[in-house]
Amino acid sequence: MSRDFVQSTSRLCSGGRLFPLVVGCLLFLHLFSFAHQRNAQSGETHLSTNQRTQFSILEKVEEENIQLPQPRKRSTRAAKRKPKRPTTFIDEFLDESSQLRNVFFPDQRTAVDSRKENGNDTYYYHPGRIWLDTEGNPIQAHGGGILYDLRTKMYYWYGEYKDGPTYHAHKKGAARVDVIGVSCYSSKDLWTWKNEGIVLAAEEKNETHDLYKLNVLERPKVIHNEKTGKYVMWMHIDDANYTKASVGVAISELPTGPFNYLYSKRPHGYDSRDMTLFKDDDGVAYLIYSSEHNKDLHIGPLNEEYIDATESMRKILIGQHREAPALFKHQGTYYMITSGCTSWSPNEALVHASESIMGPWETIGNPCIGGNKIFRLTTFFAQGTFVVPLSGVPGLFIFMADRWNPADLKDSRYVWLPLTVGRPLDHRPEYSFGLPLWSRVSIYWHKKWRLPYR
């Protein structure tokens, strides 16, 4: 609120011309805020009455006490030649020989295996551990997303299949694995996953094809079109130097494929890198992607067949350099979780909210709770990829993230954590006039946790 506005309002009020109007407006705002808070409180009371135990377990703040190891000894000569800066937790995370390696990437002995009689551990998620499918192999579905299919009443998890050697295409190139394809896993319970195979395979020989093995295929997402009956996959398509910066589209008759690759393009004429899809309650689907060299995010609806973007597009989070968007909706409000742009290094997640999917979007803070400060500032050493809506418990979602291992990308891990919506923000956004505009989005750290219903 500007100083000129305040001064002009004060003069008008002192003259008596606007005093009744101002008082009426303030009274209305006060009553609206009171009613809004009462509604929010009644919603919280309803949840705490019916599901108090379930939510209290998931919302319990779990701390981590991890200490940096003692610095390695250096010779006096080496220390004089180049003073060593203090080692950080991110340095230790990226260091293959770190003494903390097993903290970030636990070994095979602790793997989550649905084939075994796990006793009290059945249906528990263990973020960061190796996660095995029903054949006993590590799940390969990185940068992925979940589709719940009403036809088969199954969950399908699509992602990047990275079971190949990690290397650098050139000296300054990022770590990479040759494109193998998009994998698909099916489940009835979101914990036991059956490998359905590669549903969109790489092209081995045709160097001009978008899916040629030396190119890039990232962050595949699949939605179902009720009108056409088709399953539609969108993905980030690029060359090894990340200059193509496009989206690719594929379709299938079945959720388990095979998917037929259609084409790639730069949506709305702009470069496109990290991307996701969101299908709204009215059946309209949207493409959201990082653009203009990751400076902005762009969002726009797809056509009725979901195989192309329409001309409508809005630029959002302009100049904020965010990537890895993951959208979800709760009680009519749209939320989006994004990460910063630091390649394979983990960074701080932010959550954004809007009353309209096309914006304007407002940043409302870091959603991470628990662990310790560095856990919260690195999104628990992971990067978000998708938010899974759940039925049965209002305000509960699963936050899906990847803990990337740039030294061995096939050994990257999955960090699935409970995400809740419903409590008011600790700090109200600027210019909110005291009204509780957004509910708090919270992602809780747990070494092990399970869904409150099965």
Image: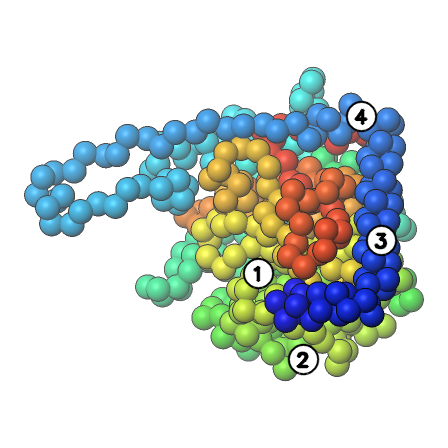
Who comes first in sequence, dot 4 or dot 1? 4
Q: Residue furthest left?
A: 77
Identified by mark 3, the residue type is Leu
Q: How far apart are marks 1 and 3 (CA)?
A: 42 Å
First in sequence: mark 2 vs mark 3: 3
Q: Which type of secondary structure does the marked residue at label 1 adopt?
A: strand
Instruction: Name the side, left or right, on which 326 lies relative to 64.
Output: right
The span from disc 2 to disc 3 (Cα, nearest Å) is 46 Å
Amino acid at circle 2: His
Vertical order, 125 against 151 (above or below):
above
Q: Mark 3 points at which residue?
A: 27
Q: Does 92 sit above or below residue 297?
A: above
User: Which amino acid type is shown beneath numbered disc 4?
Assistant: Arg
Judging by the rendered image, the residue that carries numbered circle 4 is 52
- Give the secondary structure at mark 4: helix
Residue 175: percent from the left, percent from the top? 43, 57
Q: Which-is-in-front pick, marks 4 and 1?
A: 4
Could you tell me if residue 25 is visible in this image? no
What label sits on residue 323 in the rendered view?
Answer: 1
Mark closer to the chain start, 4 or 3: 3
The image quadrant of residue 283 is: bottom right
Q: Label 3: how many residues lie within 10 Å, few (<14), some (14-19) or many (20+)? A: few
Residue 42: image x %, image y %? 87, 36
SS assignment at label 3 = helix
**CB-based contact (under 8 Å), mark 1 and mark 2:** no
Q: How crowded is mark 4: few (under 14 residues within 10 Å), some or many (20 or more)?
A: few
View extreme (front): residue: 15
Q: Is label 1 in contact with label 3 (beta carbons under 8 Å)?
A: no
Tell me if 360 is positioned left or right of 295 in this view.
right
Mark 2, residue position: 268
Q: How is the image coloured?
A: rainbow
Q: Distance between the residues labelled 4 and 3?
A: 35 Å
